[in-house]
Image: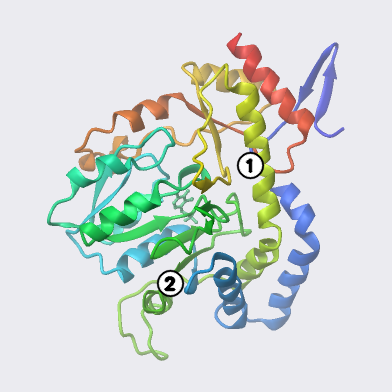
């Protein structure tokens, strides 16, 4: 009965936080066909299926070149390595992100230098310059929740200080900055296609887009640093995308703009209805937000989470701890990160998928308001 239960006079929905089934139902014809083509070909890695997706991603983003890899995490590591970030180099980044951003920096031997976030949950561009030292080599920023920071300011800072600029766009596939698609704005951009992302595979997958020389290196790294067969020119990884995932991502690419628009519409509706009760996300006019995550802030976050759960509504927390307050990364907690720390105590993410019906969204809105009254 469409997740709807009527208990005496109370309507109770069961609304999961994410709905991957809805996306599959819409794209099933293309996905099933793509999967059977790969199976029939017996070509599970390398070759035309990977290249097809790379060409489509170049076309979609407007990037010069593209290398598909095994995940968004390894995409970041490949990008840093191709950008010649070496052990001991400092990389400026944020702590309010998924751990992969920081993990990639540490995994190439570099040192993450954290900068606090602004009111849009993005790197605070005004706090970067006084963190630059003679060891700083790059700024790795994140399009958190699906929205870009002030990229013009980041470009000025990076060119003035001769720093590499890398964009972690794991959460913002299809987003735009000043009318240009993410992937064509900054030198090097990485994407994740993990199943929950704007454009999700049915397993792990990712990509790096950028200039031809960088992408050529990444194509080598992803395949053990191979030049020709069994001749290793560099130390690399096994970071190839598998062709089933490549074809699934390609099959879903045709839907991405509609799905992104659907989430933006839902987010704007939430903003309008909830703004008097909780702190709703700010939308930067320079960025086309794709709302991978719709996060609100409230002082009674844990109680709200339990209340929504009791009422059948799935929620999530992105993220419960800033990276610098976790055991593995606490040694990098050298800067003032007050806002990142505060936000993690108050943030809660509501369901925002494009298939969420209006009546279910109304129910969520009603429950959030009811809780705050
Ligand atoms: C901001 C950010 N960076 C990197 C990643 C890593 O992507 P993946 O899960 O594909 O390794 C994710 C997602 O998990 C992410 O949200």
Q: At 35% across and 37% down in the image, what residue appears?
A: 117
The spot of residue 100 in percent (x, y) is 40, 51
Q: As displayed, is residue 43 above or below residue 343?
A: below
Residue denoted by label 1: 264
Q: Is residue 256 above or below residue 147?
A: below
Q: Quadrant location of the N terminus?
A: top right
Residue at 25% over, 39% down: 330
Picture coordinates of residue 344, whole percent (x, y): 41, 29
Taking depth in this image into account, of 238 and 211 the one nearest to the observer is: 211
Q: CA distance from mark 1 to mark 2?
A: 36 Å
Proximity of marks 1 and 2: CB atoms separated by less than 8 Å: no
Q: Quick check: 335 left or right of 215?
A: left
Say which element carries label 2: loop
Using the rendered image of the protein, determine whether residue 74 is visible from the camera's viewpoint: no
In the picture shown, does residue 126 fall above or below 83? above
Q: On the rendered structure, is 179 left or right of 311? A: left
Res 212 seen here: yes
């Amino acid at each position: 009965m469409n997740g709807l239960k009527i208990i005496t006079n109370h309507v109770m929905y069961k609304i999961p936080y994410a709905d991957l089934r809805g996306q599959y139902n819409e794209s099933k014809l293309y996905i099933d066909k793509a999967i059977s083509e790969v199976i029939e070909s017996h070509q599970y890695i390398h070759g035309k299926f990977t290249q097809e997706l790379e060409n489509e991603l170049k076309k979609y983003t407007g990037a010069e070149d593209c290398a598909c890899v095994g995940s968004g995490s390894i995409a970041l590591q490949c990008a840093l390595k191709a950008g010649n970030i070496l052990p001991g180099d400092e990389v400026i980044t944020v702590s309010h992100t998924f751990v992969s951003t920081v993990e990639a920096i540490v995994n190439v031997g570099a040192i993450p230098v954290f900068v606090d976030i602004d009111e849009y949950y993005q790197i605070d561009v005004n706090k970067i310059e006084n963190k630059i030292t003679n060891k700083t080599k790059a700024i790795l920023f994140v399009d958190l929740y699906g929205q870009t920071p002030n990229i013009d300011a980041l470009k000025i800072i990076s060119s003035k200080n001769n720093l590499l600029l890398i964009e972690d766009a794991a959460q913002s596939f299809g987003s735009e900055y000043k009318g240009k698609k993410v992937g064509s704005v900054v030198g090097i951009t990485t994407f994740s296609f993990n199943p929950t992302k704007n454009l999700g595979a049915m397993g792990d997958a990712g990509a790096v887009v950028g200039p031809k020389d960088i992408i050529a290196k990444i194509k080598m790294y992803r395949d053990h640093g191979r030049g020709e067969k069994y001749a290793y020119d560099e130390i690399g990884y096994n970071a190839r995308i598998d062709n089933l995932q490549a074809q699934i991502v390609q099959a879903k690419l045709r839907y991405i703009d509609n799905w992104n628009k659907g989430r933006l519409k839902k987010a704007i509706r939430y903003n309008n209805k909830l703004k008097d009760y909780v702190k709703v996300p700010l939308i930067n006019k320079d960025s086309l937000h794709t709302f991978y995550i719709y996060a609100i802030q409230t002082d009674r976050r844990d109680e709200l989470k339990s209340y929504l759960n009791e009422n059948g509504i799935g929620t999530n927390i992105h993220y419960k701890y800033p990276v610098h307050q976790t055991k593995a990364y606490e040694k990098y907690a050298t800067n003032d990160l007050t806002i990142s720390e505060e936000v993690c105590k108050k943030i809660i993410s509501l369901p925002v998928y494009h298939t969420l019906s209006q009546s279910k969204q109304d129910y969520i809105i009603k429950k959030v308001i009811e809780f705050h009254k």
